[in-house]
Structure formats: C-alpha cells, structure tokens
Amino acid sequence: MKTKVLLVFAATCLLFFSSSINAQKGIRIGYIDMDYILENVADYNEASSELETKVQKWKVEIEAELKDVEEMRKDLNNERVLLTKELIEEREEDIFFKEKEILEYQQKRFGPNGDLFLQKRRLVQPVQDQVFVAVQEIAKNKKYDFVFDKSSDMVMLYSADRFDISDQVLLRLNRASKRKQLNSKKEKKSLERNEERNAEQEKEVTDREKAVLQKQSEREQLLAQRKAERDSIRAAKRKEFEERRAILLEIQKKKKDSINALKNEKDNLNEDDAPNSNEGEDDNN
C-alpha cells in the first residue's frame, strides 16, 4: 500500500513538474491503456478465452466437491443418533480431510501463485514485451520524453485523448503479427511497401505536430513578452505614483508643521501677556 501511495505521489509530482516547464522545454508526454490493447490483440483474446474455459471447469469441480462435503455433513447429522462416538469422530475426520483437500485445490488453481495467476502472466508477458518494443519505437520516432500506462497502479489524474498512443501501439503489433503469417516474398514486399507508406504518413503527422508545437511555443513567448512589457509599464506607473504621493505627503506635513508652529507661538505670546494685566489691576487698587 505504501509503495502504491509513493508511486502515485511520484507520478503526480512528475506530471506537475513536467506540465510547469512544458512550454519552456517542449517536454512531450504520452500514455497507453494496456487493458484496451489487450482487448484488441486477437492472439491474446483467443488464449484468454481458452483459459476462461479452464477456469470455469475448475470452478465446477470445486463446487461438486463442496456439494459432496455438504451431503456428508447432512448424512452425519441425520445418522448421529444411530452412530457410536468412534464412528461419529471417524466421519467428522473424513469431512475435515475432504474440506482440507478442497482448500488445497482452490489454492493450487486460484491462489497467489496458482495456475490462474501463472497462466495469465504467461499470456500477458509476450504482449507486454511487444508493447514495450512498440512504445520504444514510437517514443523515439515522435520524440516523447515520458510514456505512462493508464491502467497501471500509477494513477493518472487527467489524460487528454490526443496523448493516447494505444492505437499506434496496436498498429505496430498487428504489423508484426502479419509478418509472421506471410509466407511468399511477394506478400512480404507488399506489406513492406504499405509499412513504408504508413511510416511516411506518421512522419508527416510528426512534422505537423512539430509545426503546431513551434507555433504554440512562439505564441507563448510573444504572450510572455507582452505580459513582461505590461508588467514593466505598470511597475513604472506605480513607482511614479508612489513618488508623487510621497511628495504630496511631505508638502502636507510641512504645512501642518508650519500651522502647528504658528499656533504654538501665538499660545506662548498669550501666556506672556497674562501676568502684565494682573499687575495693572494691583496698581489701581
């Protein structure tokens, strides 16, 4: 569980980091859906169908054995009053060993390392190897930096259809399968010519994608340049406004200080005149 969480966290960080620098460095990310590919590989589906037939047969066998155990237990309960203690214990022991045999058989067929798991792995492994080779070729030809498997434990929080290369992988797998089935030189040459045309078409698509990415990059650079110019103009206007504001505040402060100084001077003069008035009144008395 911890491993899955770490994988999800690492994938999320990688996708976030990649998307943040994608416009600057042109990083390309693609993905495949392994479940979708397997569903469309004829050889795998045929072998998978045969395996499913075996699985159903194993399940029928287990159900029959479980039914026999149930009958044994039912018979024992019906006959218990007629049996001695030793016979009851013997019949219970038979039931116990029968159930143990069934459990062992279930583990053999459906356990973590059972026949179903091993045969599924043998079915999937060749296709996975072919998919790996196909992904390597596509990633190299189309300049992909990362290719993920959508159906794996590494969860994809979002995936745009235009980055899905599953059909391209299937196309290459089908080509390889056709090569194995062809016998005559004429058929092989015809297939090679078709593959060359397909390769040319893929190259044309790749060139168009490059042109689109180039235009997108140029547009993003132009937008970034315009944004930088707007930000520079705004910063200059802001600086000019702050300077004017500071000057006005300084002028207001000087005016206020001047008014306060005059007021204080007037108050001081009034205080000096007050004793002189008192002295004149004393002389008259």
Image: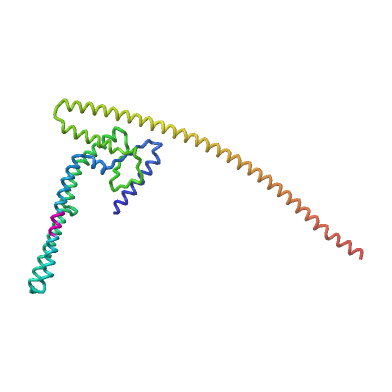
Q: Position of residue 23 (x, y in %)?
A: 40, 37
Which is more toward the observer, 93 or 226? 93
Segment tinted magenta in the rendering: 59-65
Residue drawn at (41%, 31%) of the image: 215
User: Which image quadrant: the N terminus?
Assistant: bottom left
Residue with the most extreme right position: 284
Q: How is the image coloured?
A: rainbow
> Picture quarter containing residue 180?
top left
> Picture quarter containing residue 207?
top left
Residue 235 as seen in the image, left or right of residue 20: right
Task: Indicate whether residue 63 is drawn in magenta.
Answer: yes
Which is more toward the observer, 119 or 230? 119
User: Which image quadrant: the C terminus?
Assistant: bottom right
Determine whether 39 is above or below 89 in the image.
above
Task: Indicate whether residue 13 is drawn in magenta.
Answer: no
Residue drawn at (81%, 56%) of the image: 270
Which is more toward the observer, 11 or 66? 66
Q: Position of residue 144 (x, y in %)?
A: 32, 36
Residue 240 as seen in the image, left or right of residue 114: right
Q: Position of residue 219 (x, y in %)?
A: 44, 33
Our reading of the magenta stretch's main secondary structure is helix
Residue 44 as seen in the image, left or right of residue 239: left
Residue 28 as seen in the image, left or right of residue 250: left
> Picture quarter containing residue 97?
bottom left
Determine whether 236 is above or below 270 in the image.
above
Residue drawn at (20%, 26%) of the image: 190
Q: Total number of numbered labels?
A: 0
Q: Position of residue 158 (x, y in %)?
A: 36, 44
